[in-house]
């Protein structure tokens, strides 16, 4: 008992000093952690601001020369005297290829995700999931080479002639699917983009589908719902915010993809109603011409990059607003 009393006295004597020292150390670590994280967050804003400023400075000569007419001018003739530059062709190609790509990738990606989470046998889920993830790891230039040497000839020799014959003479659709077939076209580039963004939609959809409480699905099955009814009425409504987030992430990738599109789109600034005609995108135009550009031509390409930045920003901002509204409705 005497020894325990002595040890207690020693602890009491050392206690206040040790606690103050420990609290001081914790406070120093907490303050250091706070400033490290704060500076990391601020650095993102500084980098973003630096990119915007550099784009504006580089694009200013073209902005001053062409003004708003740059947006609706189709002709692109940097070798003319004076140079004639217009962004309408690249903007049209960017929007059309991204739209077609998402039109293909969204139902296919959601279908794969639903199969993996609801219908796929357990032994098959891991191989298919790994295959989808491997698609995201393939370099874009490999997609471009495959599209140029394999997909392009197949589409030009088989798929495009079939579609041209089917819709020949049909109003509107006849113009959209008009010939002649081509190895390099907007549709070929869009199909490559659809394959490239597929892993983003599928992986995110699988992850959010797994967050659905099993009790909700079991209750739906218990009252006699089919698998399709459970997916339509329970899974998708519960996870719609995550699905939209994955779709918008994939759309941002599609808008800015460069090398794969440059290989197979044809790099033509001419606007055509046919999706089988060659075209170009903003990123493909910059990649194919920037190395040989100077002066006003280079400034025009930088202005194209600024337009792509603004376009992507507004698309993602619209997605965020949509997600906020969905969350508010879900909260109500």
Image: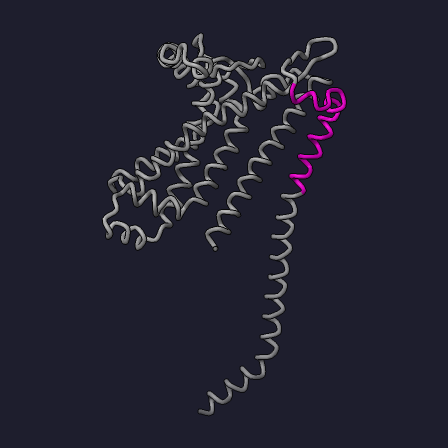
* Quarter of the image where the N terminus is located: bottom left
Residue 17 seen by the camera: yes
| Rendered image quadrant of residue 78 | top right
Residue 144: x %, y % from top left: 46, 20
Q: In this view, does 270 lie to the left or right of 178?
A: right
Q: How many labels does the image show?
A: 0
The magenta span reads 46-72
Residue 179: x %, y % from top left: 44, 9
The relative height of residue 16 versus residue 198 in the rendered view (above or below) is below
- Residue 27 falls within the magenta-colored stretch: no
Q: Which residue lies furthest to the front in this view?
A: 171
Residue 319: x %, y % from top left: 53, 40
Q: Is residue 54 left or right of residue 21?
A: right
Which residue shows up at 54% across the image and 82% down it?
11
Which residue shows up at 62% across the image and 48% down it?
41
Q: Residue furthest bottom?
A: 2
Residue 252: x %, y % from top left: 52, 33
The colouring scheme, among rainbow, by chain, secondary structure or one colour, is one colour
Q: Compare residues 175 and 74 and report the one nearer the observer.
A: 175
Considering the whole magenta stretch, tell me its main secondary structure.
Answer: helix
- Residue 68 falls within the magenta-colored stretch: yes
The relative height of residue 143 versus residue 266 in the rendered view (above or below) is below
Which residue shows up at 38% across the image and 34% down it?
109
Residue 142 seen by the camera: no
Q: Compare residues 95 and 11 and report the one nearer the observer.
A: 95
Which residue shows up at 39% across the image and 37% down it?
202
Q: Compare residues 306 and 295 and report the one nearer the observer.
A: 306
């Amino acid at each position: 008992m005497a020894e325990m009393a002595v040890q207690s006295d020693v602890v009491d004597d050392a206690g206040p000093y040790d606690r103050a020292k420990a609290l001081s150390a914790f406070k120093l670590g907490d303050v250091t952690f706070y400033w490290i994280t704060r500076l990391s967050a601020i650095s993102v804003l500084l980098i973003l601001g630096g990119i915007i400023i550099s784009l504006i400075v580089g694009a200013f000569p073209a902005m001053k020369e062409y003004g708003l007419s740059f947006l609706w001018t189709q002709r692109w003739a940097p070798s003319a005297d004076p140079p004639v530059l217009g962004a309408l062709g690249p903007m049209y190609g960017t929007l059309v290829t991204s739209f077609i790509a998402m039109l293909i990738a969204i139902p296919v990606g959601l279908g794969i995700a639903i199969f993996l989470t609801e219908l796929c046998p357990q032994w098959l889920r891991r191989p298919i999931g790994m295959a989808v993830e491997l698609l995201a790891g393939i370099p874009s230039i490999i997609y471009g080479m495959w599209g140029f040497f394999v997909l392009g000839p197949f589409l030009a020799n088989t798929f495009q002639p079939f579609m041209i014959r089917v819709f020949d003479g049909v109003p509107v659709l006849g113009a959209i699917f008009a010939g002649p077939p081509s190895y390099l076209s907007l549709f070929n580039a869009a199909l490559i983009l659809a394959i490239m963004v597929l892993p983003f939609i599928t992986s995110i959809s699988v992850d959010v589908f797994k967050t659905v409480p099993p009790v909700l699905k079991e209750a739906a099955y218990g009252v006699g719902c089919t698998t399709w009814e459970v997916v339509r009425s329970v899974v998708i409504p519960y996870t719609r915010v995550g699905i939209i987030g994955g779709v918008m992430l994939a759309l941002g990738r599609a808008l800015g993809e460069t090398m794969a599109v440059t290989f197979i789109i044809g790099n033509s600034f001419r606007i055509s109603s046919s999706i089988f005609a060659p075209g170009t995108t903003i990123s493909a135009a910059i990649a194919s011409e920037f190395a040989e550009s100077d002066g006003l031509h280079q400034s025009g390409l930088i202005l194209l990059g600024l337009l792509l930045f603004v376009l992507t920003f507004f698309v993602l901002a619209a997605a965020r607003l949509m997600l906020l509204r969905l969350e508010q409705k879900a909260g109500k």
